[in-house]
Structure formats: structure tokens, C-alpha cells
Image (cartoon, rainbow, N blue to C red):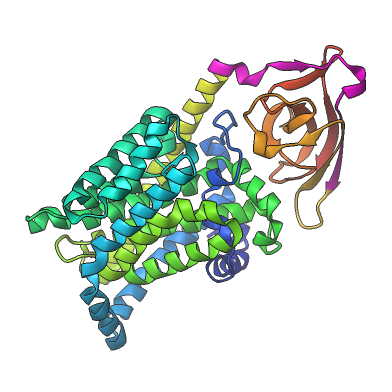
Amino acid sequence: MRFLQRVDVYKFIVALIGLLFFQQATAWAHVKWFSNFSFSDKPLTLDQAVDATFISLLVLSMIVISLLVYFDRQLKETVWFRKVDEWLSAQSEHSLTIIRVTAGAVLLLSWQADAMLVPELNISSAWIGWFQFLLALLLLFRKTVPLAGLGLIVLYGIGIYEFGIFHMLDYPMYAGAGYYLIVANSADKGIRGTGLPALYLTVGFSLCWVALEKIIYPQWGLYVLQQNPQLTMGFDLGFFLIGAAFVEFALGYLLIICLLQRPLALVITLVFFTTTMVFGKLEVIGHTLIHGALIVFLLEGPGKIYKAPITFHKRLGLRMAFGAVNFLVILAILISAYTYSAWHQYDEFSADQGMHSGQVMIADSSQVPAIDIHVEKDSLSGWNLRLDTQAFSFAPEKFGTAHVPGEGHAHLYVDGEKRARIYSRWYHISDLSRGSHSLRVTLNANSHDKYVHGGRVIADTAEIRVE
């Protein structure tokens, strides 16, 4: 319980309520869609990620999950809930239609946006877009639905080939939906019934995996929060981000073990709908298939052919222990795998690109960018960094493109270690250890190369002391 004393539990509960009911969309938005992420960014190590706040929220999550097992048992014993269950089960005949419609919508939206399945996966060849269009047509006819499902799995395989398995582990629900469509017309009831567990597992895993990026790559999520500070309700950005990660991971885990299936599906899909009000069309493209799967979960419940994992034990005490202990086990396995993979990506980029150590030489003295940084202590927590620049403008939308003179972004180094990329005049720094720290900010081109004039990198430094 010592750890619980080191985190403000009240704040976490208030933030959780805000996440669910007051449209705090960042917890549910996939960070990669709204942040100029790069696997060249340095991830946290396990030692850095698993701090007192992490362990406190882990303990709190395990307690809450145990209580949800008890709540689930009580809910299922109520008459009104049983009636709702029966009514929804009677609508389950529409499940296949829902997946066909939502998968078709995703394919058409992605085709129109020159993306493959999700917003940040830009297509490399025009034929991929037309292939998606063809799959959408195949979904119109029940007999060709399995072919469309196979096509979804092929698209997922193309994604692995072009973007890597680490990146595509964000989206196994597309492979799950493809399998669901493949077995949908099977005459064998047992085979047909495997489609629903596949959806539960892949959608739940997707939520768990993308939650971990908020922990291991906090700079990506912090960038989104800095652009939308109203989302945090005044809480510390770092604390809010890790709290959001635990909420998202826990919900993915609950889908995997099939606890509170129908209520959980309803809550998640309603919250996803609210995020569209903040993030717009990109959110629609990325979450449409998940909406379809969640509506299927709402109609189907746990299914009738295969036992839900949470029902392996009949005794309430064992179920509560099962829910809590397996949450810890799955989190430990996935965060270890995620951290290892993130560092593998980082090392590969470091070797291939020399940590982007290229330079943009500025010869014309009248067009030399300049930077002056100022650091002030934040009234709530951390430090606020202000960047005053000359002959330079931030262009986050052009990250990774060709160099344009006077455009780009900045890199922040803390004690010589790269901390983050900065895309605007203001940046919030959190989670600094006690003692003196040296800050250095460099100006970088769209191509990621450093601006250099007179043989020196264009940069500014500042010193701060954390008491």
C-alpha cells in the first residue's frame, strides 16, 4: 500500500470519470494518427517506465478489475439485465451485416484517403487503393464475403511487409475481422463460432498494444496533449497520459477475457463516438471497424459456442483472482515485448540514419534562423519552455519531407540525451529528477537535419534546477 500513498488516487478517479463521460478524447485517440511520430525517437526503458506512479496505477487497476468481476456477477442476476440480454441476443443475426458494412466503409474511406486501412499507413502503389475498392465490392454479396475477408488478411500482410510487424501490431483487429468474414459462411457451427473469439482477442489486443505506446513513447502522447491542453482538465500531462494508458489497456484486457461484454462494448463505442467531435475525419477512418466489432459484441455477448475466459472458474473468489492476476501477467508480458521491440527499432534507425546527424548549411547571412529559449516553472507541475525564433517557422505537417529553407521543427536534449521533438513555440517538460539539468534545443529542417551556420549547429541552451 506504500505505493498507493505516492499517487493521488482521487485525481485518478476524477480523470477516469472525465475520460468516460466528458469527452477527454486523447485517452482513446491513436497517437500515431495525430503526432508526427518516428521510431527514431528514443523510447523509455522498463526501469524508466515502471516507476512509483506506474506501480500504483497497476495495483489500483487490479483492485478495480476484481471488483468488476463481482459487479458482473451481480448484474447478471438482475431481472432487467437478463431481459436486455435476451433482446440483444435476438438481434445477433445482424452481426455479419454490421461487420460487412463497417469493413466496407473502412476500405472505401481508406481508398479515398490514399491510405491502407488506417490514416498513417500511406499506400505505396495505386493498385493497393484499387484492391481495397475491389474488396469493398466483394462485401456487397454474401457468397463473396469470405474472399473479402481473405483480402483483409492480405492487406494486413502487406502492411507487415511495408511497415514492419512492430507497427502493424497496433492493428491485428483487421486480421481478426478478415477471419470473421472467412468463417461466416461455414456450414460447421463450431468453425463459424470461432469468428467471435477471434474478434474479441484481436480488438482487445489492439487496445492493449496501442495503450503501451503512451507509456514507452510518452513524447508522442504529450505532443497531442500540448496541442489540446483542455483535454487534461488541469491535471499534470504526464500523470494524465499514463492514467489514460492504464484505462485503455484495462479495457482491452476486459475484452480479451470477456468480462462485462455488453456493457463494456456499449461504453467503449460511445466514448469512441465522442472522440470524433475532437479529432474529426481521421478518427472516423481509424475507428469505424472497431465500432462495428463493438456493436457485434453488444449483440452477441460472449457467444454460445466457446466459453469466455473469465468463466473458467465458477467460484467468485477464484474469478476475482483470475481477473487481477492475469491482468498483471499480460501487462508484464506485453510491456516487456513492446519495450524490446521499441529499442530494436530505435537501434535500427540509429544505425541506418546515424541518428539523423545530417546538416543543412546556411550560407546567406541574411537568412540565418535563430533561436532563443526561455524556461519558466509551471504553476502546477514541471516547466514551460518557450522558443523564440527568427527566420524560422514550425511546420509539423511537413515532418519527414524535403527541406524547405526556414521551415522545420526543434529537438530538445536534456543533459545531452534527446528528449523530444518540438513542433510549436511552447513545450511542457515534466518528470525531471531532482538536481541541475542542462537543456539544449536545436533547430532542424523538415528532413530532420540540423541547421548549421558558420560551422556551428543553430541552438540555444538553458540551465534549470529541480528542487
Q: Residue at x 53, y 65 (%)?
A: 274
Q: Report the front residue among 368 and 132.
A: 132
In this rendering, would 395 be left or right of 321? right
- View extreme (top): residue: 455
In this rendering, would 269 be left or right of 240? left
Q: Position of residue 146 (x, y in %)?
A: 19, 48
Q: Position of residue 260 (x, y in %)?
A: 34, 69
Q: Quadrant of residue 197?
A: bottom left
> Which span is picked out in magenta?
351-376
Q: Report the front residue among 75 and 69.
A: 75
In this rendering, would 183 be left or right of 45? left
Does 353 sit above or below residue 232? above
In this rendering, would 155 be left or right of 379? left
Instruction: Tell me, yes or no, if residue 180 can be seen here.
Output: yes
Q: Residue at x 73, y 33 (%)?
A: 409
- View extreme (right): residue: 366
- Figure label count: 0
Does 56 sit above or below residue 73? above
Per the image, is 327 magenta?
no
Q: Quadrant of residue 7?
A: bottom right
Q: Position of residue 439 (x, y in %)?
A: 79, 33
Does 256 sit above or below residue 350? below
Q: Residue at x 40, y 64 (%)?
A: 65
Q: Residue at x 33, y 73 (%)?
A: 72
Does 422 sit above or below residue 103? above
Q: Quadrant of residue 140?
A: bottom left
Q: Position of residue 198 (x, y in %)?
A: 25, 51
Instruction: Tell me, yes or no, if residue 159 can be seen here.
Output: no
- View extreme (left): residue: 188
